[in-house]
Image (cartoon, rainbow, N blue to C red):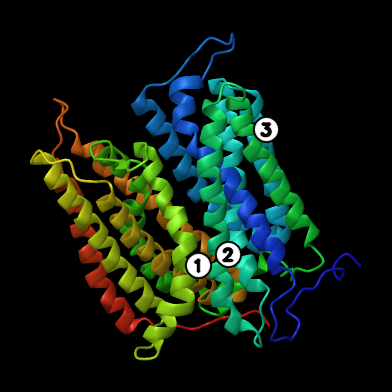
Amino acid sequence: MAKTKYLTSPVPSDKMPGGIPYIIGNEAAERFSFYGMKGILYTFMTKYLVDHTGAFDTMSESEANTWIHTFTFAVYILTILGAILSDIFLGKYRTILFLSIIYCLGHLVLAVNLTQGGLILGLSLIALGSGGIKPCVSAHVGDQFGQKNQHLISKVFAWFYFSINLGAAASNIITPLLLEHDSFGPHWAFGVPGVLMFIATVCFWLGRHKFIHIPPGGIQILDDIHKIQGWKIIGKISIVFIFFIPFWAMFDQTASAWISQAEKLNRNFYIFELLPSQLQAANPILILILIPTFAYFIYPKINQYYKLTYLKKISAGFFLMTLSFLLVAWLEQRIESGDVPHAAWQLLGYVILTSAEIMVSITALEFAYSQAPNFMKSFIMALYLSAIALGNLFTAGVNFFNETPDGSQRLDGPAYYLFFSGVMFITAMLFLLVIRYYKEKTYIQN
């Protein structure tokens, strides 16, 4: 009876699946919790961290950066564990639900224990929960569609990404205010994201009778992989994913190198002055504006003259990312010459970078789902998300080797940004070969 109480395959229909609103609501609340927590980590570690006696026991800037990048790396590497649990043992729904509970516990630990021990335990639980559900949630979206309504997948993935950035934009505004306000502080700043994660979990659970529950493949999945030459499919799609590593290595620097540059810009906007870290809020806000612009205007117009495939969109995004770093390299050159450029120029860089993100990241989610055989969609999604982890690792390595023993930089000023621009341009040029030779094959649940 337990095996049949949920739908296990899409119902033939050309309408929007009934479970989609629950997934979108879950994602908006979950992303608020994650970005709200992550957005205040640096400030918490350097200003509010205490020892077991309650005395301040804060970290240095370099220590805090190391913790944050290690945490981010752990989140995206643990996507592989979530994919294994989902595709072999539990299925996507149960994996998401169980790991969301662990995720909530991590937020609870951070909210009540402000020591380094609480930080380690809380972030470990969140990394396991957040990382584990990442490949499952995106694949779970695609599972809701069958042959008749698969034409709606592109729009749903766009709105799925829209919900991510709606949550991120709101949390980037609210949680720093909670942390800095005398009436609230770190307990509230970590507690509110925890409440949102609890709401996300409840929202997901409420949709259980609306969702399509694709059952796990079990150990038999290894035989299935062998029968359909699955290892060949994994190798083929992994070649595409390798090209995403430089993209994410550059994108995630909006929280580091771009903020450092923003400190040297003129941030006065008539009646107010932005803080350097506030400029990065431009990304989720622009996402909310540009997603419908691309989905309902830019893509349809281009398709009238030139058929856009997944890989062609991604290729265009790679070239745009190159352009965004060329712009900030130019800004850095002006700063070195003694000028104080206006921050509006970096905001233009955010417009270009965010456009690249829409063409690459949203498309990659749909590409990873559609190109994966039905029984291993979470695993393929985890492979894609691992590219984000490796991108962060690449940037960390570049910064580690960039610093000389005397504290100077081998790649200083504009040379730093030009290095990444060059890497991305070479990547984009090589990706043109992928467009030419990669043969897309779409797998949809039926």
**Amino acid on which the number 1 mark rests in the picture:** Leu
Determine the secondary structure under disc 1: helix
Q: Quadrant of the C terminus?
A: bottom right
Q: Which residue is more in the foreground, 172 or 107?
A: 172
Rendered location of residue 259, percent (x, y): 32, 40
* Mark 2 burial class by Cα count in 10 Å: few <14, some 14-19, many 20+: many
Rendered location of residue 208, percent (x, y): 79, 62
Are the residues tagged 1 and 3 within 8 Å (C-beta)?
Answer: no
The residue labelled by disc 2 is: 160
Q: Name the side, left or right, on which 191 lies relative to 338.
A: right
Q: Quadrant of residue 360?
A: bottom left
How many circles with numbers are drawn on the protein? 3
Q: Residue at x 33, y 55 (%)?
A: 350
Q: Find the distance from the CA under tag 2 to the CA under tag 1.
A: 10 Å
* Mark 1 burial class by Cα count in 10 Å: few <14, some 14-19, many 20+: many
| Camera-side mark, 2 or 3 | 2
Determine the secondary structure under disc 2: helix
Q: Find the distance from the CA under tag 1 to the CA under tag 3.
A: 30 Å
- Label number found at residue 210: none
Q: Quadrant of residue 316?
A: bottom left
Rendered location of residue 282, percent (x, y): 40, 51
| Nearer-N-terminus badge (1/3) | 3
Q: Residue at x 29, y 42 (%)?
A: 257
| Nearer-N-terminus badge (2/1) | 2
**Amino acid on which the number 3 mark rests in the picture:** Leu
Instruction: Give the answer, above or below, for where 356 lies relative to 280.
Output: below
**Amino acid on which the number 2 mark rests in the picture:** Phe
Q: Find the distance from the CA under tag 2 to the CA under tag 3.
A: 26 Å
The residue labelled by disc 3 is: 108
Q: Which residue is more in the foreground, 228 or 413?
A: 413
- Label number found at residue 365: 1
